[in-house]
Image (cartoon, helix red, strand yellow):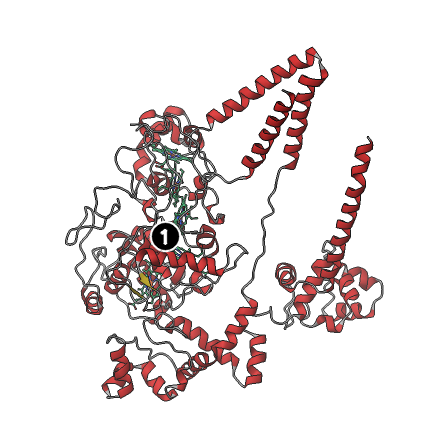
Amino acid sequence: MKSFIKITSVFALIIALVSCNSEQRSRKIQYMGDTDMYDAVPYEAYSADHKVFKNGMEAQTPVVGTIARGKVAYDYPNSEVGYQLAKDSLRSPMKFKAPLDSIYRVSKANLAQGKHLYNIYCAVCHGKKGDGQGDLVKREKFLGVPNYKGRQITEGSIYHVIMYGRGIMGSHASQLNDKERWQVTHYVEQLRNDLLK
Amino acid sequence: MKSVNQHRKPLRLFLSSLIFILFFTMQLFAQDGNAKNGKKIFNANCAACHKLDARLVGPPLKGVTEKRTKEWLFSWIKDSKALIESGDADAIAIFEEYNKIPMTGYSDFSDQDLADVLAYTDDKPVKDASGTSGAATAASLGIDSLQVVKGKKIFNANCAACHKLDAKLVGPPLANIADKRSADWLKLWIRDNGALRASGDADAIAIFDEYNGSPMTAFPELKDADIEALIAFTSHASILEAKAKTGDTEVSNVAEVASIPWATYLVLLVVVLFTIWVYFISGNGFLKLMMTIAILIATGYFLYAWLMGIGVDQGYKPIQPIAFSHKIHAGDNKIDCQYCHSNAKHSKLSGIPSVNVCMNCHKSIAEYTGPVTEERDKVFYDGEIQKIYDAIGWDKEKLTYIEGYKQKPIEWVRIHNLPDFAYYNHSQHVTVAGLECQTCHGPVEEMDEVEQFSPLTMGWCIECHKKTELKVESNGYYAKIHEELSKKYGVKKVTVAQMGGRECGKCHY
């Protein structure tokens, strides 16, 4: 009897030693774990292993030729021709001309939002000032980012580049919606003008 | 008692030898200070008044150890005033020379620190990533290293988007391009390759055709000197690289010392032994009773704590399919959280980035060059990056997506997951309330592997709602309701809970 207790207490000690040190690699048990109160009956976003779709994935790209709700169509093709076309003819819907004003302007709120978004999505490479000196460039992880000053860009071409990317720069269309792309575009224009001064 | 004594002797021997070894290694270190650490100390303490190679408030410090003895320097740095007062001629001369401005004393520096700083002042290679030592080797080869450095800058800013030195990118590799083409040809081509082609130059047309007829951007703004520097760089980049290899790749051997709470185990052991003694050896009835009560209370306590932990996955840290490190991305490289978790601003979910987002950077970053540890070396990290390419079908040699590749998803393991009956929305907290991700998710930018930082219990949600005030500025939506509510509760600023953040129906429906 005595030795039995001794042995169990030694075992308990070893278990305590082991369990305290390990990382938590699996979930703990859940109260009413398997009921639908906890785990959704409908599919969770991004889950895999569902048989509804051919490739078993929840996240699907839109059917070719359709536009998801809330998205805006963009007709310029993803090519050099499309780039030139956008550069020459694509104009922002966000600019307005106040009475008695000769230039088209963008509202302060849109520019402020553009700055906020630019600092999140573009500044890692292009730098906060648009001089091509973002953190990734300074750390020599990602090279070849131009100074906006050195490029002949228009609002149309900036929008096009955010939409499809250019050269080694990738598309940022999945991270920014139509309105936000224009806000960023106008902030880039502003940065460029400041750099050219 | 005896047995205790017997144990002590070897222990003491062991300890004293340990101390001896420690002391000995310290001595060793003190001999040749650690220049890297010295640089840190120098930049934090000395750089305000000293440069290495030029006079600032104080004299330049490069090679100072050749001028003065170590002992002298130590006592000067620790307390220069005392040294001057002691009548040391050198000290007085310096004091006079620098307008009688006394130097701050650094008496709290250890000898090791000082040795490190001095090592830094005479160890040239650490000084500048692109400077002196490269220049030394370059000079012996008759290369103008300044030109190479300048060329590198120009290359990185203009050419690197489409060219690498030793591999094909959008355009051809450029290493040693001067062996193939003349400088004049290169100047014409770089400034305006369209015109060169139009003039019927056979080489130019051949290149154009080889690279699928996509024209290269023209750089009319580059001057002759710039292009010469570029050529110098493409021919002699290796002098900078050799430098980078010796200087930059630091293997940080920060072996994590597992902090085992030995004290806890010791106490536990004593308690268990005591219990056994009470029940089976002592035969004391009162003690047994007290022990039983104590054990019951303890069991109740631990059982309660265990039950309350059900379904609370604080600290959950599953193994992910790719050893993606937030420390490297969000911490070291300062990529904003929302660059990847871009849904947080508009939607309920923050979302895990799809592979195209990874590829925005990893089209070009195919190799890891940051600091490594023993278990996670460069080969490991490169393998992890390769996993992205395997998922999406990217050919990193040809730099194209493989056509007809059967892409497969990267199946990240979800960590944070509220039960289905609770509704939580990121955009309300991130965009409207303007909370930082870190308030709820902890210091993610320091985690190599993400773990659940907060308990995500209902009490946790409510606690924050009770004490956080609404951010009403620049939010027209709140203007009216805020005015009414602050009147009703008689407060200046309304908390989330007062606005209704504690009503059941807001989260459970």
Picture residue at 30% right of the left edge, 75% below the top: B217
Q: Quadrant of the C terminus of chain A?
A: bottom left
A87 sits to left or right of B40: left
Q: Quadrant of residue B268?
A: top right
Q: Quadrant of the N terminus of chain A?
A: top right
Residue A58, horizontal then vertical, whole percent: 26, 44
For this rendering, which residue is in front, B180 or B374? B374
Q: Quadrant of residue A142?
A: bottom left
Q: Quadrant of residue B218?
A: bottom left
For this rendering, which residue is in front, B4 or B401? B4
Disc 1, SS: helix
Q: To which chain does the residue with label 1 belong?
A: B
Q: Residue furthest left?
A: A65
Q: Is residue B145 visible?
A: yes
Residue B20, horizontal then vertical, whole percent: 78, 52
Residue A54, horizontal then vertical, whole percent: 21, 47
* Residue labelled with disc 1: B339
- In this picture, is B242 found above or below B287? below
- In this picture, is B311 found above or below B50? above
Q: Residue furthest right?
A: B87
A170 sits to left or right of B65: left
Q: Is residue A129 visible?
A: no
B152 sits to left or right of A67: right
Q: Amino acid at mark 1?
A: Tyr
Q: Crowding at label 1, few (<14), some or many (≥20) Cα neighbours within 10 Å?
A: many
For this rendering, which residue is in front, B138 or A177? B138
